[in-house]
Image: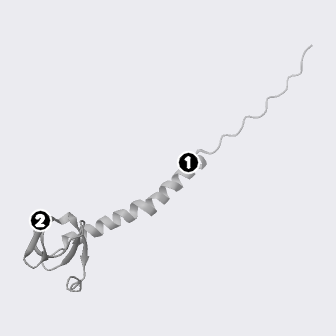
Amino acid sequence: MISVAHAAPAAAQQPDPLMSMLPLIIIFVLFYFMLIRPQMKRAKEQKKMLEALQKGDEVVTASGQVGKIVKVGEQYVSLEIADGVTTHVQKSAVQTLLPKGTIKGM
């Protein structure tokens, strides 16, 4: 009539909180080194290139126009895209700096 009481099994051990967060930490570190850091480096190089623009540089804009810089302002540059044809674009639209003489070779 009296039943034998059995001891309850030992409580399962709680996993280490650091070990449960480790996959998230590893993913964040990989995300930083493979995406964020290279993007910041490219943005820094682009900003440096835009600050160094000067008259006579040959550039390609984001819209694909190829031209020679005739005038550089604080926010805008004037591009000569053909003989006597000048356009004004924002500095931030300049995408690539070309080597000298590239336009003549086209």
What is the number of the mark on residue 21? 1
**Which residue appears at 13% of the width and 77% of the height?**
82
What numbered label is drawn on residue 84?
none
Nearer to us: label 1 or label 2: 2
Tell whether 44 sits left or right of 88: right
Please name the amino acid that badge 2 sits on. Answer: Glu
Residue at screen point 34% across, 67% down: 41
Helix, strand or loop under label 2: loop
Percent x, y of residue 104: 20, 85
Q: Are marks 1 and 2 in contact (CB under 8 Å)?
A: no
Residue sitting at x 27%, y 68%:
46
- Precedes in sequence: disc 1 or disc 2: 1
Q: Nearer the viewer, residue 75 or 21?
A: 75
Image quarter (top left, top right, bottom left or bottom right) of the N terminus? top right
Residue 32 placement, left or right of 62 = right
Residue type at numbered disc 1: Met
Q: Nearer the viewer, residue 79 or 8?
A: 79
Q: Is residue 106 above or below residue 86?
A: below
In the picture, measured across the screen, residue 27 lies left or right of residue 56, that is right
Residue identified by numbered label 2: 74
Query: Residue at position x 39%, y 65% from top?
Result: 38
Q: Position of residue 73 (x, y in %)?
A: 10, 67
In the image, 13 versus 80, the foreground residue is: 80
